[in-house]
Each structure stands twice: as structure tokens, then as C-alpha cells.
Amino acid sequence: MSAPTHIPVLLQETIETLAVQPGGRYIDCTLGAGGHAAAILDQSSPGGQLLGIDADPEAIKIAKTRLEAYSSSILLVNENFVDLEAICIKYDFLPVHGILFDLGLSSLQLNNHGRGFSFQHDAPLDMRFSPSQEVTAADIINTSSEAELAQLIKTYGEEARSHQIAHRIVQERPIKTTLHLVQTIEQAVGSRRGRLHPATKTFQALRIAVNHELEHLEAVLKQAINLLGYKGRLVVISYHSLEDRIVKRLMQQESKDCICPPGVPICVCGHRACLRLINKIVITPSPREVKLNPRSRSAKLRAAERLIIQDEYYRNAEEHSFSAHSSAKGWRRPALLKKLRVAFSTTLTR
Ligand SMILES: C[S@@+](CC[C@H](N)C(=O)[O-])C[C@H]1O[C@@H](n2cnc3c(N)ncnc32)[C@H](O)[C@@H]1O
């Protein structure tokens, strides 16, 4: 039997929208098994460089083996991408030609029965991308109030029956394993009727909450834009509407010169576009790709290109760069500013 693997989603479309070029410098913020990274390295050869980031130490190990042939062109780090700016400064990896996010979890994580991501295999309710995170799915399930659970399942799972599920969970606690949780959900709302298993949305909600996925995505996208050189590309593949909404909203907002509310007669926001949308309509997998890789079915790819830097934007970025994350890592203001200034004044060659 062949080793379990992860098939990279929208691979060709990713390489095209990233506009990968020989000698370019790229960041794969969600390295996973290194499928997209390998294609980026192929396409950027000779001279290409790749910084690969993943919160999961297992993913880093697997990708390291897979990308062995490119060892002199890669830097792989086991970090959370929420600290992207600090990571790039630490490794002096900026500005860059392209940044990729292929969000969510890999097939390797889903199929690893010990991780608790799948409702099809019995395992401890864990769901952390990294063992260094403190809070597991079991902690959330067993310590949240019924109202908190209902809210979480509704917000992050978009589950209409969140109150029934939360009520049943609280009656059934302690719940420590995936199958116990699946049975509890089935007791609350019945077993499978439609296309989706009744536990799908609750599992999605828990995974998002455990890993702070939406907060981290919000926080990292602006950092990513700041790290792109002129004409650098940002490509994001998302797998559910909550992620896609964040990506779409930010890319649309940052591609407009004015973001005043409708009805304001004269612009008062002073906002200047720093992105150009590459694809006005979201890119989705072809029926052929979905047939070959059913896990690609919900994928949505959005891409944008960095415009020349405006002074106003530079000032915003300066403020942004002194976020809690940067200072928590002990980055000193002058050093950070100097590096960002270089990034902002650099036009990448194409
Ligand atoms: C869909 S997989 C990427 C697969 C990869 N593109 C490939 O072709 O093999 C997503 C990966 O992103 C990682 N990930 C998700 N959120 C992260 C975060 N906030 N920081 C770092 N890595 C993260 C997960 O651990 C997972 O390995």
C-alpha cells in the first residue's frame, strides 16, 4: 500500500496566480506535506528561495523529507503564521515575490487517527495543530457553559441546531473522545439524513476555536501584504465560507482607493489601494479535480497583486507592525522599522 499523502489543491492555478518566476522569493505559510512548496521550488528554479511555515512539527518533518532535493533553497520553520512578520524579520526573508496560504488541515492530519480531527475514527478530542498549544477540543467541550458552546457551534460551524447539540453535550459530559462526541451529536439531532454527517459542522467549529483560525487569518493577511514587494502576489485558498469571507473582504477593501460608507458625498477616509485583484471571480476546482480529489470540492482561491506603496499605507503598516505579536517576541522597534523600510521601498524584478 502506498504511503498516505496530501494532494495539493488547485496546484496549477496556484502557480499561475502566484506568477512564480525563476529566482523569486516565496513564502508558503501552510507548508503541510510540501506539495505546493515543491511546485513553487520547481518553477522558481534556478535561484528561487522558499520559506515554509507550519504550526505542526509533524508537517515540517514530512515536508523536509519531501523537499530534500531543494535543501539549499529552503528554510522550514515550525511556527504559527500569526507571527509571520516577526518570522520574516528574524530570518531576514523580505520583501518577497509571493505568499501562499492553503488554509485548514492536510489529509495527513485528518487521517492521523491520534489527532482527533476526524469524526470517522475514535481518538482523544485534541484537534491542536501544534502540541505546544494548551487548549484541546476536550477542554472546550468539558469546561464551556452551554450558552458558550451553542454560540461557538453556531458561529464557527454555522450549525442551525447548535442549541440542541450544546444542551445534549452538557448533559453527557465528560466527553473525551471523538466517537463519544459523534454519538452525543447524533442523540441530539439524529443520524445522517442529507449529504453532510451531523457532526461535520460541530467538528469544524471546534477545530476553528482550538486553533484560533479566524483570528489568526485576520491578523496575518495584513502582515502578508506588508511583506510583499511591488507586484508581489498574495494567494489564499480557503475551504469554508467563514475563511473566504475574511479573505474576500480584506482583498476587496485593500484594492479600493476609498472605503467611505455609501452615501458619504466626499471621501473622508483617505484610504489608498495597495492591492490589485488578480481574479475578480473566485477560482474553484474543475469537476475533474473534484473527482480525483474530493477534498478539493470546497476550495476557493483568491489572489491579489501588491501595488506601489503609498505613504498613507506605509504609515498604517508601521503602526500595524508593532502589534502584540511582534513586541511579544522582543523585536526592537528601530530594527523592525529599518527592515520594513527596505521592504517598502523595494521594487521586485519580474
Ligand atoms: C491544507 S494543509 C497545506 C497543504 C500543503 N499546501 C501541501 O500541498 O501539502 C494546511 C497546513 O497549514 C497548517 N496550518 C494551519 N494553520 C496554521 C497556522 N496558523 N500557522 C501555521 N500553520 C498552520 C496546518 O498544520 C496544515 O499542515
Image (cartoon, helix red, strand yellow):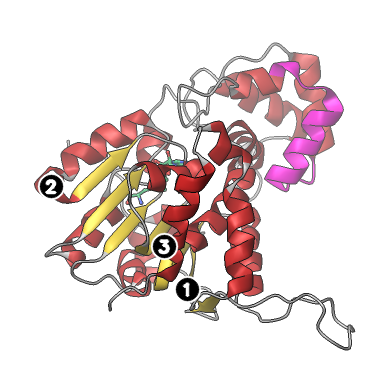
Q: Quadrant of residue 8?
A: bottom left
Residue on which the image places disc 1: 306
Give the answer, above or below, for where 71 lies relative to 346: above
In the image: residue 97, left or right of residue 193: left
Q: Quadrant of residue 60?
A: top left
Task: Decide which of tag 2 and tag 3 comes sooner along the chain.
Answer: 2
Closer-to-camera residue (122/26): 26
Q: Is residue 244 visible?
A: no
Cβ atoms at labels 1 and 3 below 8 Å apart: no
Give the answer, above or below, for where 240 lies relative to 130: below
Find the magenta span and give its range: 142-161
Q: Secondary structure at mark 2?
A: helix
Ligand 1 placement by image quarter = top left
Judge the density around disc 2: few (<14), some (14-19), many (≥20) Cα neighbours within 10 Å: few
Name the image quarter holding the N terminus. top left
Q: Quadrant of residue 281?
A: bottom right
Residue on which the image places disc 3: 343
For badge 1, the amino acid type reads Arg
- Name the magenta segment's main secondary structure: helix
Closer-to-camera residue (202/37): 37
